[in-house]
Image (cartoon, rainbow, N blue to C red):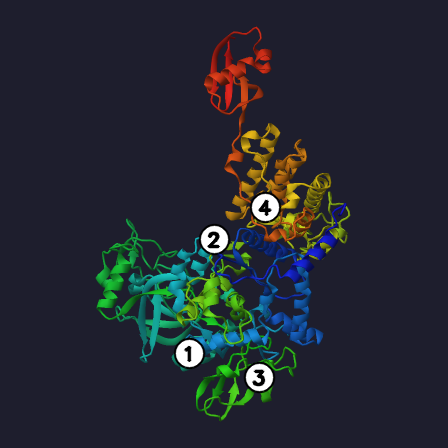
Amino acid sequence: MESRYTPGEIEQKWQQVWAEQRLDQASDDASKPKFYALSMFPYPSGNLHMGHVRNYTITDVVARVRRMQGYRVLHPMGWDAFGLPAENAAIDRGIHPAQWTYQNIDQMRAQLQELGLSYDWEREVATCAPDYYRWTQWIFIQMLQMGLAYQKEAAVNWDPIDQTVLANEQVDSEGRSWRSGALVEKKLLRQWFLKITDYAEELLQDLDKLPGWPERVRTMQANWIGKSTGARVVFTTEGGDELPVFTTRPDTLWGATFMVLSPEHPLVEKLTAPDRVATVEDYRKEAAAKSEIDRTAEDREKTGVWTGSYAVNPVNSAKIPIWIADYVLMGYGTGAIMAVPAHDQRDFAFARKFALPVKVVVQPEGETLDGDTLTEAWPGDGVMVNSGPLDGTPAGKGEGQSVAAAIAWLEANGKGNGEANYRLRDWLISRQRYWGVPIPVVHCPSCGIVPVPDDQLPVTLPEDVEFSGRGASPLAQLEHWVNVPCPSCGEPAKRETDTMDTFIDSSWYFLRYTDAQNTDQAFDADKVNGWMPVDQYVGGIEHAILHLLYSRFLTKVLRDRGLLNFDEPFQRLLTQGMVQNLTYKNPKTGKYVPSDQVADPANPVDPSTGDALEVFYEKMSKSKYNGVDPKAVLAKYGADTARMFILFKAPPEKDLEWDDADVEGQYRFLNRVWRLVTEYIAAHPDSPVRAHSSAPQPAPQGDLSKDEKTLRRAIHSAIKDITEDIDGDYQFNTAVSELMKLNNALSDAPCKDSPVYAEGVRALVLLLAPFAPHIADELWHQLGHADSVHLAPWPSFDPAALVSDEITLVIQVMGKTRGTLEVPADSDKAALEQYARESEIAQRYLEGKEIKKVIVVPGKLVNFVVAG
């Protein structure tokens, strides 16, 4: 038997045993209830950070407890392995992206295994593996056949020096290319889109089906979808072209005095008068060089140019000028707005700058506004004026007010229609780079867009590729790969050279885990319907919008394709807080200083400048020099200590502040558990806790001594409280506190030879198992069990053990507590008063005094009121 706790040896031993026994393999045994526990899979950067450790430990505890509670558990892991960093590595290191990616995967898999995470590694997926992205391509073709995938021209980031398209991640905060430093321009290219907008309303409404999600995340999703109700109205140009607009205030149509188009609007060239061409073209180039954030900033001075053309307002036939301005974006709404400067501050600022008319159509109660003298827009309610059929109608969006009246009038007169609009745009999935899923279509001069037949999937990435970061996509430069016969007619055709946005890969990976080895289908319907939805999903708040929204969208698409039978992929969502560490920053230079360069933490100064440093907690990162390497923690303390600290330091949804002293504290606690159990084993070689896998049965509750009852109450209180902490809101920090209290109760108990003590030792090891799995299995084995502790049933508490025979009675004199007394729990008021009068406390404090009144609060206190 080990005489001391040696985590390095113990953890390596048990990880090997679990792997050999395939202990964590998910069972498809339908006789057990299912539980699907899932952490968001990582990008294989090569090294785990403490954020990973926290995420995966939280999910692992949930998975381990559910197994012990009798569930069949699916707890898989994989790799979100496509994307820009691997391509950058190919450029910088002269190494193929696949080689860089797979060596990182091997490294990170080993690190995950060192943490003792109970993954079913037989279901591992990597999104860059052809046997995975074959099915990503197949899913794309399903959407193409459903009319949900299409191509259209769209603005992209264009590097004018390298002559290449840039992803948003390749553009810095100043709008410059990450590689050439050139100011990035907007350029129209044909791009692939998915019609997520077809599901906008369902994605919004089904948020109500997700009570297990944080309210904050549901609100973020609702705001991103951005539903607004109003009307679609069509203005016409003098040449007869239609300019549709969507407005949430159709009641103000009579106050529209000009129109504004996005510089990218397809009608701009046609509408530009000959003498305005140079001015308009110059302005469009300027707008193309600006980011959307710059263009739409509220405090930015408005800019724009007149096209020289006019539109006709459909409600009053007024002729109004058509301008272009960069604050109108082609990607939102229709790319055209009607401007009502009297009642919209942005339009008002534009009108005043360019001397455009301001017409009042809403008069606030008790005031008369004049468009010529207004100093700011009036956005509030009031009464409609100068609005034809709406004059005198109360202004507003309520029942019987002007918005509803305007929509009714527009529809009755064939001038427009009420409709809902969404901020959500169709999902642009085209990427002009190599390391992604090739879009599986061929462009044929005769047949058009032709999907690659299923039996020719996957369209694999060619390996003979040069990576320079310049020019067109690397795939577009490989003629032997691009030029292929049309799958339909056999004539010469060309492959699509765009690859897919990596969000596609991560929008269905949780489905593949349910049937990861299937070579004939993306997944079997019975298996995916049997395991899904995910019961508990754990990941960072940074994925609260796009990843979760895209995953919800794809799930609904595959449901409508008849491939699965559920509406939502993730039943419960936990967004864990960040892991923070003490950080040193020079407020004058803005530079961070590594902690090992701070000579005196009590008086921190910059070693280079002597400036006093700011000290605060901030998210761990390399750039802030405040990271803690998980490998160093595991090497010093072991995985179980790292897990215990991560779980104990803060509730999972809160930020966690790293503290070396608290890590050391958890290590000491595990050593105390080790000593307690091994000393018990040494002293009780024939204990029933060692001889049987079932719990030893102590004597009936009524036959136990006072010490035994006290200990048994502590044991079953711990079982009850820890179970509630795990089954409720995952308050692992308080669960670990309960484990520490139980260990203390056992250490302090005088009845160490009692069966109750044996029961407590067994319960301690069982309750510890999900949190510190290695030490728990080692101690369980030393207690004489042949099977793993993780195969043992989770303990249940005995309500009778929680009932106390005694209560603590507070004794007061004139309302001031003088002491306490242990008395029978079933004592009535008279008995409580008698116990109090006869106590040594009362004798001492009441001697020689006249008792005028005795106040008894049953179960709590006795207060003596004495004469002055």
Query: Where residue 36 sits in the image (x, y, percent)?
Result: 52, 59
| Residue that numbered label 1 is attached to | 145
Q: Secondary structure at mark 1?
A: helix
Tell which of 576 and 708 is nearer to you. 708
Residue 242 visible in the snapshot = yes
Query: Where residue 14 sits in the image (x, y, percent)?
Result: 68, 56
Tell which of 716 and 624 is nearer to you. 716
Tell me: residue 212, above or below residue 502.
above
CA gap between label 1 and label 4 equals: 58 Å
Q: Identify the disc placed on residue 476.
A: 3
Q: Residues within 10 Å of mark 4 (few under 14, many from 20)?
A: few
Q: Secondary structure at mark 3?
A: helix
CA gap between label 2 and label 3 equals: 43 Å
Look at discs 3 and 1 and give the one toward the viewer: 1
Q: Earlier in the sequence, mark 2 or mark 1?
A: 1
Look at discs 4 and 3 and give the one toward the viewer: 4
- The three-letter code of the residue at mark 4 reads Ser
What residue appears at the point 57 percent right and 13 percent down from the top-left corner? 842
CB atoms of marks 3 and 1 within 8 Å: no
- The three-letter code of the residue at mark 1 reads Gln
Q: Identify the disc placed on residue 216.
A: 2
| Residue that numbered label 4 is attached to | 694
